Image (spheres, rainbow, N blue to C red):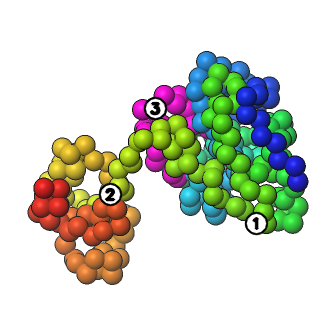
């Protein structure tokens, strides 16, 4: 398997047939890359485990930070057809990412990243990599090592962000468990907003149950706030923590 680093080279000229609503459109690489700063990550297949659990979600999560540092678009490329890619985007709720269906593997071959996944019944697919592209020219590529399995060590969003903004300190991940109609939950969320802290909300009855809440926190009340893997507690606990 020969993987090619294309740094300082122009990206291949390819037209992607894309389904938008009930219409077909032809999307060219010039339309996607010309005059823009673009982060692209490519992976073996939609709906596959590492791609769905780690690779895609983190890029989607860090999209606002990439934008802050001058990235216009984040693209996810896979050798899948447009219907599969559209369904995957909807399933992942990855609205910050632009999904590019390289169904014929033309772009992947042009990047020197096409590999055989016949052993998995996949046929020809893309090797896992990421790159920073400025006005159609590749500035930087992070290519996973040629080793067995599906390595995922350098094409992740954090590695790319560290290259683009090496001095940037990421906020610790914050999650808050709430339920509808809870005034203390509203208070806790407002505290986080006032401190300009981004958070993910887990709603009881929709995203989790009280059984899960008790199992994780030993509590039955909400809100319950977690910061950087640490259980902080309710709204008053959050005030003390942030103070």
Residue at coordinates 56% horizontally, 58% vertically from top-left?
A: 54
The residue sitting at the top extreme is: 35
Whether residue 193 appears in this view of the structure is: yes
For the residue labelled by badge 3, is the local secondary structure a helix, a strand or a loop? loop
Image position of 60 (left or right of 104): left
Residue 21 higher or lower than 186, as above or below: above
Residue at coordinates 30% horizontally, 61% vertically from top-left?
A: 227
Q: Position of residue 182 (x, y in %)?
A: 17, 60
Q: Which mark is residue 174?
A: 2
Magenta region's main secondary structure?
Answer: helix
Residue 125 higher or lower than 161, as above or below: below
User: Residue beneath label 3, please?
Assistant: 69
For the residue labelled by badge 1, is the local secondary structure a helix, a strand or a loop? loop
The Cα atoms of the two marked residues, 2 and 1, are separated by 32 Å
Residue at coordinates 69% horizontally, 24% vertically from top-left?
A: 136
User: For the magenta stretch, what is the residue range?
Assistant: 57-75
| Label 1 CA crowd tier, 10 Å (few <14, some 14–19, many 20+) | few
């Amino acid at each position: 398997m020969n993987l090619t680093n294309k740094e300082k080279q122009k990206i291949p000229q390819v037209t992607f047939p894309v389904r938008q609503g009930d219409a077909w459109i032809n999307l060219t690489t010039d339309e996607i890359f010309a005059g823009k700063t673009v982060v692209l990550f490519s992976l073996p297949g939609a709906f596959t485990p590492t791609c769905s659990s780690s690779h895609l979600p983190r890029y989607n999560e860090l999209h606002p930070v990439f934008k802050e540092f001058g990235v216009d678009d984040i693209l996810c490329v896979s050798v899948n057809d447009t219907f599969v890619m559209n369904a995957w985007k909807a399933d992942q709720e990855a609205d910050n990412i632009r999904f590019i269906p390289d169904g014929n593997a033309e772009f992947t071959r042009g990047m020197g990243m096409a590999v055989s996944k016949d052993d998995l019944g996949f046929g020809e697919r893309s090797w896992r990599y990421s790159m920073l592209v400025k006005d159609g020219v590749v500035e930087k590529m992070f290519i996973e090592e040629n080793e067995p399995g599906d390595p995922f060590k350098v094409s992740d969003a954090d590695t790319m962000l560290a290259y683009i903004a090496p001095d940037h300190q990421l906020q610790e991940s914050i999650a808050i468990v709430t339920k509808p109609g809870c005034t203390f939950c509203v208070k806790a969320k407002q505290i986080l907003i006032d401190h300009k802290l981004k958070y993910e909300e887990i709603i009881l009855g929709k995203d989790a149950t009280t059984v899960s809440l008790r199992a994780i926190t030993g509590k039955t009340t909400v809100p319950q706030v977690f910061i950087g893997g640490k259980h902080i507690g309710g709204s008053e606990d959050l005030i003390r923590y942030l103070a």
